[in-house]
């Protein structure tokens, strides 16, 4: 395999980091809305916010995790020093999935709020490890192309970023992909 283009690899890494920031921001927003409703003891709003949160988890965050496990994680695990990192990252995905289930099945506003807050905390540390350890490990690899791994992976970098990678134009102005 030819050595990946450094600028292309850096752009791919930046797109992943931006998408992670978008996921964290959306998760924080869902959790804050649910927590606010719980603090006001507004049970109907808690259940509405929980339903919106769970829908988002199943549509965005959990598919993102599965996509990472199918593409990025195997490549990183094959790198020297990557196997233990990836094992830990997979364990964190299991915790995130478990917390999503806990949120979905919460029988009280307090339990729903607790699960939401735990999701925020776990995801924050998880994304830091991905951004600061996993992605750089892949970018430094001479025989792996992060951009190649991301090809077609909407769940990792978002639809607008994927269009930018596909045709060089995005035009969205909001996804953070750098296209335009």
Image (tube, rainbow, N blue to C red):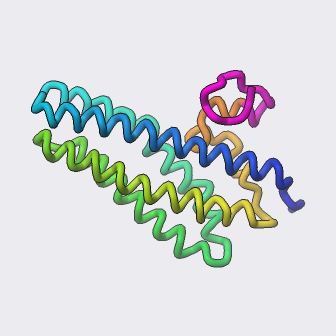
Is residue 111 rendered to the left or right of residue 4? left
Residue under the image location 86 percent in, 53 percent down: 5
Residue under the image location 24 percent in, 41 percent down: 104
Residue under the image location 71 percent in, 22 percent down: 171
Direction top: furthest residue: 171
Q: Nearer the viewer, residue 177 or 88?
A: 177
Q: Position of residue 24 (x, y in %)?
A: 45, 44
Q: Position of residue 32 (x, y in %)?
A: 30, 37
Image quadrant in which you'd find residue 160: top right
Numbered circles on residues, count: 0
Q: Which residues are magenta?
A: 164-180
Q: Position of residue 33 (x, y in %)?
A: 28, 32
Direction right: furthest residue: 2
Q: Position of residue 156 (x, y in %)?
A: 58, 44
Is residue 85 rendered to the left or right of residue 122? right
Image quadrant in which you'd find residue 176: top right
Q: Quadrant of the C terminus?
A: top right
Is 36 drawn above or below residue 142 in the view shown? above
- Asked if the magenta segment contains residue 91, the reply would be no
Q: Nearer the viewer, residue 33 or 89?
A: 33
Main SS of residues in magenta:
loop
Is 9 drawn above or below residue 107 in the view shown? below
- Asked if the magenta segment contains residue 172, the reply would be yes
């Amino acid at each position: 395999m030819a050595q990946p283009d450094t600028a292309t690899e850096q752009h791919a890494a930046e797109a992943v980091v931006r998408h992670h920031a978008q996921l964290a921001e959306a998760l924080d927003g869902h959790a804050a809305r649910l927590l606010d409703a719980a603090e006001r003891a507004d049970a109907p709003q808690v259940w509405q916010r929980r339903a919106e949160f769970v829908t988002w988890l199943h549509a965005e965050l959990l598919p993102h995790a599965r996509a990472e496990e199918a593409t990025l994680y195997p490549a990183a695990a094959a790198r020297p020093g990557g196997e233990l990192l990836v094992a830990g990252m997979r364990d964190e995905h299991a915790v995130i999935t478990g917390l999503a289930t806990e949120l979905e099945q919460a029988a009280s506003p307090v339990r729903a709020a607790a699960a939401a807050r735990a999701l925020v905390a776990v995801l924050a540390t998880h994304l830091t490890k991905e951004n600061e350890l996993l992605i750089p490990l892949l970018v430094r690899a001479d025989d792996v192309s992060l951009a190649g791994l991301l090809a077609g992976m909407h769940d990792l970098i978002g639809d607008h970023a994927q269009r930018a990678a596909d045709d060089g134009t995005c035009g969205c102005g909001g996804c953070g992909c750098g296209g335009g």
